[in-house]
Image: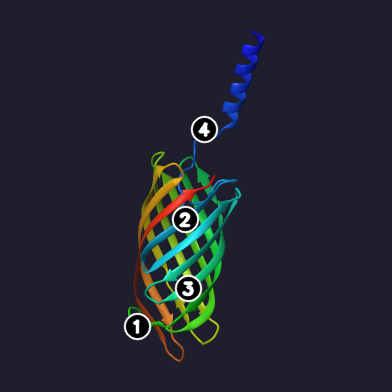
Amino acid sequence: MISTLLVMLLSGADDTALPTTRVTGGVLAPASLPAGTNALYGFVGAPEVGVGYRQGFGLVEFDARGVFNVFKVSVIGEAGVKFAAFSREKLRLAPTLALGLEFNSGTRYVAPTNFGFIGLRPRLGLNASYAFTDTISGIAQLEVPWAIALTVQGFQVTPLVGAGAEFHLGGGFSLLVSAHVGFDATKEPLGVTQYSPAWAARLGVGYRLF
């Protein structure tokens, strides 16, 4: 009888130690990863394709990624942090601050105002996620990337707002579908600032390591 009671007590302790709910996702959901969790992700679409890594620390999440812009033929490497500013039940909000380096070829086949440069690329943003079910999360995102040319005079700013959903596929895998709209403001060397519509579509796959 004593051994049975000990087994029951240990089982109860183990159950309380485990989290009651698992936060699924990996690409954008959840808006900020819980402490001790991490994920790999990749996405394709237009105008960008990329891969990245997320690591949750609780109040802060580290995010590093590499991106290739198909329209501008530019390569971007960046690292940043997301701040777990708000988390209540199924809703999470996380402001984003990142800094990267961009190598832009200046190709104008699709982007007629593009120009070649090497520059810094700070990015501000806000991520929101809402877990509708254990397997489906809605996401909303505001991104303001600002490319500051160092080799010539000029800049590119492309604010985008977007929404989509991330679906748990089983195991550690998830699937993201999202669409984004905004505008592009480009100041070419010796030119004036020009404005044009901007958009993006992304299909991503995430894998939660822990």
Q: Give the residue number, with chain letter if any, for mark 3.
A: 75
Residue 50, quarter of picture: bottom left
Circle 2 Cα neighbour tier, 10 Å, few/some/many (<14 / 14–19 / ≥20) = many
Residue 136 percent location from the top left of the image: 38, 44
Q: How far across and how far down the image is residue 209, in percent?
A: 53, 47
Q: Amino acid at mark 1?
A: Pro
Q: How many marks?
A: 4
| Real-space CA distance between mark 2 and mark 1, rounded to the nearest whole angstrom | 31 Å
| Crowd rating for badge 3 (residues with CA inside 10 Å; few <14, some 14–19, many 20+) | some
Under mark 2, the amino acid is Tyr
The answer to which of 90 and 24 lies nearer the viewer is: 24
Q: Amino acid at mark 4?
A: Thr
Query: Which residue in the rendered view is the most extreme toward the bottom?
Result: 190
Residue 20's label in the rendered image is: 4
Image position of 156 with respect to 50: above or below = below
| Residue of label 2 | 41
Contact (Cβ within 8 Å) of mark 2 with mark 3: no
Quadrant of the image containing the C terminus? top right
CA separation in Å, label 4 and label 2:
25 Å
User: Do residues under tags 1 and 4 come within 8 Å of each other at their CB atoms?
Assistant: no
Local crowd at mark 1 within 10 Å, few (<14), some, or many (≥20)? few
Where disc 3 sits, the SS reads strand
Task: Give the label, 2 or 1, closer to the camera.
Answer: 2
Q: Which residue is mark 1?
A: 112
Viewport quadrant of the N terminus: top right
In the displayed structure, 145 sits above or below 149; it is above
| Label located before the other in sequence (1 or 3) | 3
In space, the residues marked 4 and 3 are separated at their CA atoms by 41 Å
